């Protein structure tokens, strides 16, 4: 009788929470290879309201990721004319533990009027980076990959 409950509990531990960050292909590859890093975040930040933090937008399921994906792409235009989306996945329990510790916050983008309907931003403070780097799975989504491969850029 309790075996099924334990199986469900184990399954719940593997629920992944996805988020998107728009940036250049070079920055995305760097994050994918070395992880989140405060010095890199400071070096590649443009007008950040929290210097050294990593900004993303939470996503829904792959079949309907929601407006966060588009917003992340648009923020990526600040880094490149041909931005990529860096998709991160964290176990949901890790994300919520970081939130509870005050190391991650999901909030309105400061200074953006409500009528613009900008999706909430998720801010990973630099103190969260070591935990995020231990648990995150990264994927780069490059809308320009075919053109890059064909040398059309």
Image: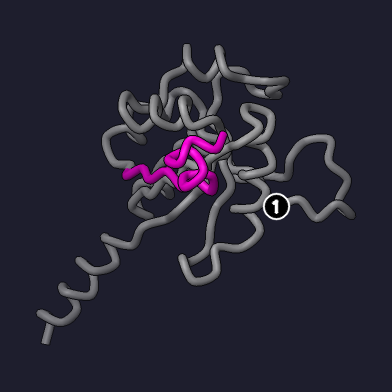
**Rendered position, 46 above or below 118:** above
Point out residue 48 in the picture as x, y percentages from the top left corner.
68, 23
Highlighted range, magenta: 137-153
Which of the two residues, 119 or 93, is positioned nearer the viewer here?
119
- Residue 100 in view of the camera: no
Which of the two residues, 130 or 100, is positioned nearer the viewer here?
130
**Residue closest to the far bottom:** 1
**SS under mark 1:** loop
Point out residue 103 in the picture as x, y percentages from the top left corner.
48, 33
Which residue is pictured at 52% across the width and 20% down the height?
A: 41
Number of numbered discs visible in the structure rendering: 1
Which residue is pictured at 27% across the width and 61% down the height?
A: 14
Which residue is pictured at 36% across the width and 35% down the height?
A: 132
Relative horizontal placement of residue 127, taking residue 152 as reference (left or right): left
Relative horizontal placement of residue 64, taking residue 35 as reference (left or right): right
Q: Quadrant of residue 105?
A: top right
Quarter of the figure that contains the N terminus: bottom left
Relative horizontal placement of residue 92, taking residue 19 as reference (left or right): left
Point out residue 98 in the picture as x, y percentages from the top left corner.
42, 40
Number of residues whose C-alpha sits closer than 10 Å to that of mark 1, classed few (under 14), some (14–19) or many (20 or more) = many
Quarter of the figure that contains the C terminus: top right
- Tag 1 residue: 119
**Rendered position, 35 above or below 140:** above
Residue 35 is inside the magenta segment = no
Which of the two residues, 139 or 125, is positioned nearer the viewer here?
139
- Residue 83 in view of the camera: yes
Point out residue 31 in the picture as x, y percentages from the top left corner.
40, 28
């Amino acid at each position: 009788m309790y075996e099924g409950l334990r199986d469900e509990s184990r399954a719940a531990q593997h629920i992944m929470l996805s988020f998107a960050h728009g940036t250049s292909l070079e920055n995305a590859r760097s994050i994918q290879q070395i992880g989140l890093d405060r010095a890199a975040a400071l070096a590649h930040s443009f007008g950040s309201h929290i210097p050294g933090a990593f900004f993303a937008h939470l996503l829904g399921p792959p079949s309907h990721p929601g407006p966060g994906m588009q917003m992340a792409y648009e923020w990526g235009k600040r880094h490149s004319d041909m931005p990529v989306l860096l998709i991160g996945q964290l176990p949901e329990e890790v994300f919520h533990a970081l939130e509870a510790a005050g190391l991650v916050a999901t909030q309105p983008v400061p200074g953006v009027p409500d009528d613009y309907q900008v999706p909430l931003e998720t801010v990973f403070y630099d103190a969260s980076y070591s935990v995020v780097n231990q648990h995150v799975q990264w994927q780069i989504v490059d809308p320009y990959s075919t053109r890059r491969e064909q040398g059309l850029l």
